[in-house]
Image: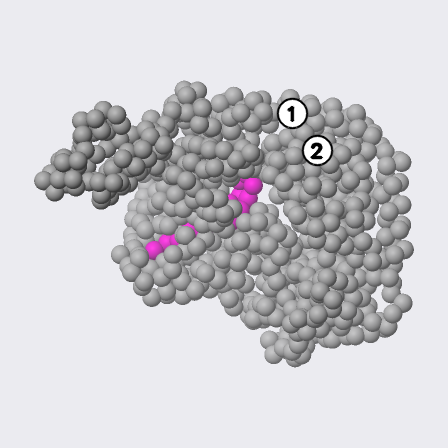
Amino acid sequence: METLEITKDKTALAAKVTTSITGSQAVLECFIAEGVETIFGYPGGAIMPIYDALYDYQEKLKHILVRHEQGGIHAAQGYARTSGRVGVVFATSGPGATNLVTGLADAMIDSTPLVAITGQVFAHLLGTDAFQETDVINITTPVTKWNYQVTDATEIPAVLAKAFYIAKSGRPGPVLIDITKNAQIQKFDYEGYITCSHIRSYRPKPIVRKDYIERAAKLINEAQKTFVLFGQGVILGKAEKEFKQFVEKSGIPSAWTILGLSALPTDHPLNVGMLGMHGNYGPNVLTNECDVLIAVGMRFDDRVTGRLDKYARQAKIIHLDIDPSEIDKNVKTAVPVWGDCKETLPLLTSLLEQKCYPQWLQRFKDFQKEEEDVCINNELHPSTEELTMGEVIHLLNELTKGEAVIVTDVGQHQMVACRYAKFNQSRSNVTSGGLGTMGFALPAAIGAKFGAPERTVVAVIGDGGVQMTIQELGTIMQSEVDVKILILNNHFLGMVRQWQQLFNDKRYSFVDIASPDYVMVAKAYGISGNSVGNREQLKDAIAAMLHHKGSYLLEVHVGKENNVFPMVPQGCSVSEIRLK
Amino acid sequence: MKQEFTITVYTENQIGLLNRIAIIFSRRKINIDSLNTSPSEIEGIHRFTIVINETEDVVKKLARQIEKQVDVLKAFYNTDDEIVWQELALYKVSTDEIAEKVKVERLLREYGARAVVIRKDYTVFETSGHHEETDKLVKVLEPYGLIEFVRSARVAIIKASNGFHERLREFEQTDPGEDVIENEYLGKQGEVFTM
């Protein structure tokens, strides 16, 4: 059957030009109308009709066959994060759908726009414990922004339009649409796709109130020690330019959450570094000294705030956020500025006096110097024989010149990569922030590459995380995805080991994880690779990885018991951050 | 300080929404004392009435989480003095017992009870009111063998509300007026919750 050409012309619609197509074809037609180009997925019984329809759409829709549905959804996340578009994933009913749950939870907490389509058993079998039947809607309710079960094909165009609108508007998030097999097969008169732009019960953007912007501006203009915290909201709102103008006019030192990383170039003079548990010294200590704290598109996660009752108590807090439920959720706000920061930031900037805070900025520099002396220099230029994770990232920066997309997994290497990676442009840092999903990086890097094909994508992964989703090497092999895989192998589940060392008297309980020969594993998948463990070879090895045409795996053996510092121990205030 | 709050939620009629709202409470290990779903003053719009015992700070955050759900139009929360509410209770007793030993007439007068069904074998009474009131009749009937007792969830009317008609008209527009839709809470310092 040939691909259908469905007109979106309004006059034709008015004349009710309809075409009889199946629910499955409608799903794909809606995707095309919505501008979807890439789908990550895995077929199975209950989604077979959609895959059958997809057979005829291969020219228009690129489908990437993953090795596990979790890999599929993480890839869709990576795609969404680098491209700024909605990631799309297919999975079948039952186990296919339950395998999506981790990715949905990850996308929910990190506000990643996704549309997941799951197949479901025939509507007449719902609730009968049919083969591969599971209650996907109820399982995924807490981890989706919205979900819906389609049992009749005629619902598909409107439901999908709603799904894409909800996923990408306001504070983005994952949407799951569960489609019963009968609806996929059912033929109906398709009248074309109408994009959704309004749902009466849904207000994606709060109305911007000028009086609050004026109050915020007044506070900022009168303040002496102002401090900006920025999060992913700047990136999600595509407001990097507006944010830069705001920072430059106000002259305020600015620090980032790990999801805000790359929204402002790393080497910007007002970028003072990273917040939180393994963030930089100055930003953490001075959080408890500033007089006005401006939070832009961030949610005061406990990894950022440390002990809440000792967090920035002296400061008046201005919170810019699109999600009203974030205001006052963790930290009491003096002035809430609700709205899309793409709109609110320019309004605020226009009311600010051009300022600079040389003395205040110097405080950050002094702390930076101290941190360099105690931790950073040892990490980036170690005198020990063992390699450090930091020096690997340092060399990677040198060779990529801040142009690469760096995808990280979860753990010590993630903190080190976020601390030391340099970025010149936004959407360069892809990591699992809120959920902390080990196994995220390898599949997310695949998606990140499809989302930004012109850019170099380096997945930095620990030896624990890579073994969680290592099967996605098969996806890289089959789809010939040019992903550079950099495994920082410390032969431990390093972050847990670090905590066991510091807080559990070095009782290393089940953190001693063995690795396979990664180069051999890669070779089995037809992926070139190398493994290094000494300093002389390191730079050449990284350069070889970057220059290699196509995917490449580089394993670097790093010190077994290196720790990530600085660190705000759990239950401590951010100003009690330890340098060693 | 914890106190009783009644949360009123106006929603679309959507399968699964009850679960979406209920898990906002269960996720935080907050017990729902009473939950009622019913039609509202507007056709097609549903109204949830949820009673919990919590601090205002927690209730405000819960209301925001509820209102964040795509299919929820609005969530309000009120203390008991801001609402008029009723609960309905049914009591089944043995007709023989009750006819013989109780002055039924006095019972009906004193507790505002009505006899819904009178059969040879059993009688069903009905009362409505606050639960302290409906509980009283339980105490009275217990010695005579209360066969069954059931009490409904709370239904409540907000004293200060002008209904939802005007708000809905605003919601249906792509660009709603800010007075009706947003940020009311900011001006009223948390008195009324609204997005």
Numbered disc total? 2
**Residue A181 highlighted magenta (yes or no):** yes
Which dot marks residue B105? Answer: none
Q: Residue at x 52, y 68 (%)?
A: A67
Q: Residue at x 72, y 75 (%)?
A: A530
| Quadrant position of the N terminus of chain A in the picture | bottom left
Amino acid type for the residue under numbered disc 1: Tyr
Q: Label 2: chain?
A: A
Left or right for A437, reference B103 = right
The residue labelled by disc 2 is A317
Classify mark 1: helix, strand or loop: helix
Q: Nearer the viewer, residue A299 or A439?
A: A299
| Mark 2 neighbour density, 10 Å: few (under 14) some (14–19) many (20 or more) | many
Q: Label 1: chain?
A: A
Q: Nearer the viewer, residue A312 or A436?
A: A312
Q: Position of residue A490 (x, y in %)?
A: 73, 70
Classify mark 2: helix, strand or loop: strand
Write down the region rendered in magenta: A167-182
Q: In the figure, residue A545 lies in which quadrant?
A: bottom right
Residue A354 visible, this orientation: yes
Q: Position of residue A568 (x, y in %)?
A: 75, 52
Residue A247 visible, this orientation: no
Q: Nearer the viewer, residue B150 or A343?
A: B150
Amino acid type for the residue under numbered disc 2: Ile
Which dot marks residue A212? Answer: 1
**Residue A573 highlighted magenta (yes or no):** no
Q: Residue at x 48, y 44 (%)?
A: B30
Q: Position of residue B179 (x, y in %)?
A: 52, 21
| Quadrant position of the C terminus of chain A in the picture | bottom right
